[in-house]
Image: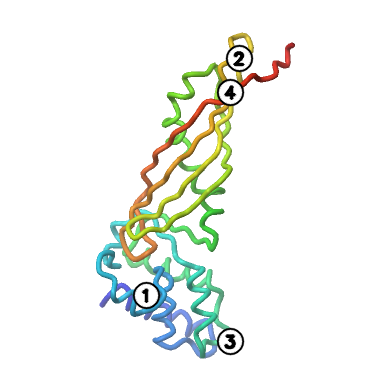
Amino acid sequence: MSTQKECVDHLRAYCRLHTLKGIGAGHAHELVAAYFGYRSVAALRAEGSYQLNMLEEAEILIPDLTLMQQRIGRLRGLPVDLLPVGVLAEEISRFLVDSGYFAGDIWHTSNLAEYMETDVIQHYTTIIEDDLSGQMSETNAYFDQLDIEKVELAKGENALTVDVSGSLSGKHDWDRMFHGDSITFNAVMTFQRVAGRVAYMKPDIATGGTVNNGYQYDPAE
């Protein structure tokens, strides 16, 4: 039995317990397809390069909650007491984990750019700072604050690319000549696609930056 079919059967069983009438097989197939990032069951079945049986190789899973919500808005005959999209997605995710199909991190969010800024990027600050070690060495500052100004996402055929812009700020030793205490940086995070349209490897990160070495006010003056 395919991963898709097992997810469908589990979702139907779950909905039978939590709705008055449950959901039909066709509706469940459409919701599972949307969970994996496909606009239709036909599109999921036509997938050639990123089969769902590769899920166990992935490290990050990002269910497409927005697409699931869109499908619910267009499908007719769904139960009036159907559970919220977030609940349905979490149940599919739990099934994948419990069944051994996936063992990585799952990001349940309908706003990926915001989630990247508030949660994900913070886990990779050490890598970004390491990439900026050359620029940091040009200054006499001690860097301790990473600020994100802009996050842009691009979903390609083979990868999810996240472009992050911001600044790394620190404190200057005013007993030494000033050489800048902030670095403007740009980091490109590339998540290679593994399975479906929502399962990826952990990102490769490439960061570049420029020291802002304009004159700064010395509080001791």
Q: What residue type is labelled 2?
A: Asp
User: How busy is the neighbourhood of tag 2: few (under 14 within 10 Å), some, or many (20 plus)?
Assistant: some
Find the residue positioned furthest to the front: 214
Disc 1 or disc 2, which is closer to the eye? 2
Disc 1 or disc 4, which is closer to the eye? 4
Whichever of callouts 1 and 4 sits on the residue coming sooner in the sequence is 1
Q: How far apart are marks 2 and 4 (CA)?
A: 9 Å
Residue indicated by mark 2: 173
Whichever of callouts 1 and 2 sits on the residue coming sooner in the sequence is 1
Q: Residue 7 carries which label?
A: 1
Q: Is residue 75 above or below residue 69?
A: below
Q: Where is residue 143 in the image (x, y as percent from the top left)?
A: 55, 26
Q: What residue type is labelled 3?
A: Val
Q: Which amino acid does label 4 sit on?
A: Asp
Residue indicated by mark 4: 181
Whichever of callouts 2 and 3 sits on the residue coming sooner in the sequence is 3
